Image (spheres, rainbow, N blue to C red):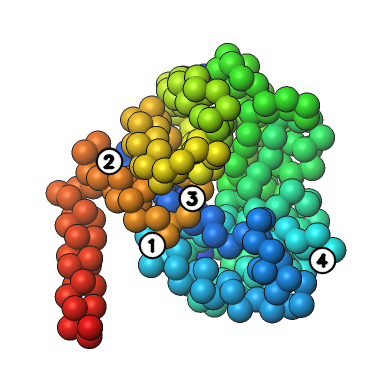
């Protein structure tokens, strides 16, 4: 198992651009906005065949600093596979960022992977035997990477030990039964809402530390989960992600339109030595200065 403990790098590609997620690289921001969940108007537009909001979402996430774009078209009473294919093609026409294909429907994932021009990240698979058997062959067939959640059908483990046990199961099944490289497995350590239980972040951080040391794989999480139900959510997010980065988190699915969180991540990259000579930090600062000067000049 020694080779598994070495830090892995997960390579994603669009038709023209490569993004590498890794423990010694800058944190990867996966923009979550192209998702109709909780967005009633967006859902109505998609049912009517109107995908125009996607263009605005792509622009906002790219301008906010996203490295990868999560694309989810889970709208009830629609052909999700067809919608997902349309959305992926539209996103690829608007940006050269790689895509994370997000669906719980196997047929939609297959259609999206077939339509995608590049090397995608699949969101997601759990440790359930049936889900592993349904999704991992698609990941292998399309040479993709996959986000994996260490939970079963009927529970989200609240102890780090159980999460590590299920992480081991996922990695062993994926590598030994399906020939998927450990580098292409991105584990979600399960960041839960702090408002429900104030111990959950410590459990997530312990899980991250152990995954990094025991398996060396990359990790991601839904960054907004932690602050769900609490006030001042952006402040909590801006505190949580740098803490998680020191524990081994290498990417997060988040709304890149929140500057306070994005800037906290970029600052942590610099302080952790993942931003050579501070060039990304300095470039971002100069871009903000230029934008402010332009706004002042046109006011």
Q: Are marks 1 and 2 in contact (CB under 8 Å)?
A: no
Q: Is residue 104 left or right of residue 274?
A: right
Circle 4 — which element?
loop
* Residue tagged 4: 78
Query: Residue drawn 48% across and 50% down?
Result: 254
Q: Earlier in the sequence, mark 4 or mark 2?
A: 4
Sequence order check, earlier mark of 1 and 3: 1
Q: Quadrant of residue 273?
A: top left
Whichever of labels 3 and 2 marks the residue nearer the N terminus, that label is 3
Q: Quadrant of residue 151?
A: top right
Instruction: Report, in whole angstroms, how far the alpha carbon at label 1 lies from the one at label 3.
Output: 11 Å
- State how far apart marks 3 and 2 are (Cα): 16 Å
Q: Is residue 3 visible?
A: no
For label 2, the crowd category at 10 Å Cα-Cα, with few meaning under 14, some 14 to 19 and many 20 or more, is many
Q: Are marks 3 and 4 in contact (CB under 8 Å)?
A: no
Disc with the residue nearer the chain's start (1 vs 2) = 1
> What residue is disc 3 on?
254
Kindly check if marks 4 and 1 are in contact, taking CB atoms under 8 A apart as contact: no
Q: Nearer the viewer, residue 24 or 6?
A: 24
* x, y percent for residue 36: 66, 61
Q: Are marks 1 and 3 in contact (CB under 8 Å)?
A: no
Q: Label for residue 268?
A: 2
**Mark 3 and mark 4: span between their CA atoms?**
25 Å
Q: Residue at label 1?
A: 64
The Cα–Cα distance between marks 4 and 1, rounded to whole angstroms, is 30 Å
Please tell me how crowded label 4 is: few (under 14), some (14-19), or many (20+) other residues with Cα within 10 Å: some
In which quarter of the view is residue 32 placed?
Answer: bottom right
Q: Is residue 135 visible?
A: yes
Spatial CA distance of label 4 from label 2 is: 41 Å
Q: Is residue 96 left or right of residue 135?
A: left
């Amino acid at each position: 198992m020694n080779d598994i403990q070495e830090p892995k790098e997960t390579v994603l590609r669009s038709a023209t651009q490569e993004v590498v997620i890794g423990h010694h690289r800058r944190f990867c921001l996966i923009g979550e906005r192209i998702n109709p969940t909780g967005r009633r108007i967006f859902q109505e537009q998609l049912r009517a065949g109107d995908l125009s909001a996607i263009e605005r979402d792509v622009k906002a996430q790219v301008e906010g600093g996203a490295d990868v774009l999560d694309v989810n078209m889970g709208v009830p009473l629609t052909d999700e596979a067809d919608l997902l294919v349309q959305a992926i093609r539209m996103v690829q026409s608007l940006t050269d960022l790689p895509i994370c294909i997000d669906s719980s429907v196997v047929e939609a994932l297959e259609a999206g992977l077939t339509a995608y021009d590049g090397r995608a990240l699949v969101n997601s698979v759990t440790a359930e035997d049936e889900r592993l058997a349904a999704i991992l062959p698609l990941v292998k067939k399309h040479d993709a990477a996959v986000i994996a959640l260490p939970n079963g059908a009927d529970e989200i483990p609240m102890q780090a030990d159980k999460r590590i046990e299920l992480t081991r199961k996922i990695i062993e099944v994926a590598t030994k039964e399906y020939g998927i490289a450990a580098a292409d497995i991105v584990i979600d350590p399960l960041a839960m809402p702090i408002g429900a239980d104030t111990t959950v972040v410590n459990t997530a951080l312990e899980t991250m530390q152990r995954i990094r040391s025991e398996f060396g794989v990359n990790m991601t999480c839904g960054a907004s989960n932690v602050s769900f139900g609490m006030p001042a959510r952006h402040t909590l997010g801006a505190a949580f992600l740098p803490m998680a980065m020191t524990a081994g988190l290498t990417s997060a699915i988040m709304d890149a339109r929140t500057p306070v969180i994005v800037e906290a991540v970029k600052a942590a990259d610099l302080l952790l030595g993942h931003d050579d000579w501070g060039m990304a930090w300095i470039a971002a600062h100069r871009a903000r200065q230029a934008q402010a000067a332009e706004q002042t000049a046109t006011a």
